[in-house]
Image (cartoon, rainbow, N blue to C red):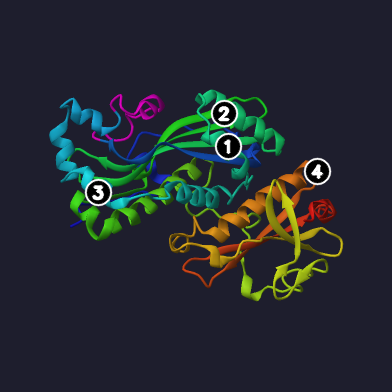
Amino acid sequence: MKRVTCVVLAFAICGCATAPMSFKPGTTEKMQKIVIVTSPIKDEFVVLNHLKGTNFANTTSLYAGAAGYLVGALLDAGIQADQTQASLGGKPKVLKEKIGLIPIKNHIDDYLAEQISKRYHIAESSYFLENIQQKKMAKDKKADAYIAHCKEIGADTLLTVDFLYGLAVYSGDMASAVIDSVITVYDVKTKKVLLEKVIASDLYFKEGYSIDEYAADDAKLFNNNIVKAARGLSLLIGYEFGIDVNYVDKTKRVLPVNALHVSCKKPYLLEQDCSNLRGAKRKIEINDYMCKIAASHDGTVILIMTSAKISEATEEELKSPTSHLLTKANNTCFELITAELSRHNINILKKVKMELYQVSYPATAGYFLELDGDGYSILKQYTK
């Protein structure tokens, strides 16, 4: 039985919490190209202390974790244990054993990119940032490495989102699936921190249930609600950048095309290395990764595809749009190729995603890029 339901519109937060910190006037108007980096503080389910709401939380307490923010430490010390147990209505271990591994980072990445891209250009560079993320480095050293990469690809703003996910416990309310995050925004040119604050998803989405309810049917309810929390978090972060839930910038929104409706003549006339049956034909290798490309006669429109086959996807990969083999492979090709074009001062004027709908979820089957110069001549140098 559901105990609490609360959905708060991002632009009405002040009615249920203290007014959030904001950028200085005019700051977001100067932003054009943003790199987004999301990282788990702990890559596992945790129980989080919201007994006093979320306003008490600061960046230090969220990173410290065991210093009082993670409920496990509170229970071990016997502090506020009764309130915590009443909110949970059971043992967290029961739920933790049922949920398994959740691709929560992928959900946050997808929702956040979708929201921020309504107003800004997102520099899709996760392939290059992956090695930095995996290194054990101090937060400021990691930020320096990220900023250096941002400069290389011409981004002016860096947004980092460090997060914890799990259940939040409340005083008088049942626990809710939640994602708590520290967002930090940097000016790439000056390395100055423009904004740093804690944002919790339950300021947008909050539904209270007991542990047993969350754990039923292989944790189906929790898995569904944590995805809703990821979407809520992205809306709240987007609001910081001047994007409310109804914001639409028609100059930034480009609808994907159905792969089954694509040919060498539509949506673009591709006269180089194109097959109506197979799509892009020219195989290239960049950084030991195989991709396929085709282009218009002047090389200013290119089609990017991967060499991976959908038959290679596992059953688990076919269940999730964020971890799908085909989507990941095409995104990697996109990142590698756009980085190479950027190094040769070729800019992307428009990106159109090609999607395949004959799987459990839409999968990215490739990308069309409109360029401000002949990028195809550059890419042909990598022909395999």
User: How far, Cα to Cα, is label 2 from label 4?
Assistant: 25 Å
> Which type of secondary structure does the marked residue at label 3 adopt?
helix
Q: In this rendered view, identify the residue nearer to me: 54 or 218.
A: 218
Q: Quadrant of residue 37?
A: top right
User: Tag 1 or tag 3, which sits nearer the N-term?
Assistant: 3
Within 10 angstroms of label 3, few (less than 14), some, or many (20 or more) residues? many
Q: Horizontal and vertical percent for residue 97? A: 26, 48
User: In the rendered structure, does residue 180 fall within the stretch colored magenta?
Assistant: no
User: How far, Cα to Cα, is label 1 from label 4?
Assistant: 25 Å
Amino acid carrying mark 3 in the image: Leu
User: Tag 4 or tag 2, which sits nearer the N-term?
Assistant: 2
Indicate which disc residue 143 carries.
Answer: 2
Q: Horizontal and vertical percent for residue 177? A: 31, 47
Q: Is residue 131 left or right of residue 222?
A: right
Instruction: Name the residue beneath numbered marker 4.
Output: 345
Instruction: Name the residue beneath numbered marker 1.
Output: 131
Instruction: Judge whether 72 appears above or below 289 on screen.
Output: above
Instruction: Name the residue beneath numbered marker 3.
Output: 95
Whether label 2 touches label 4, CB < 8 Å: no
User: How far, Cα to Cα, is label 4 from label 3?
Assistant: 51 Å
Q: Is residue 221 left or right of residue 357?
A: left
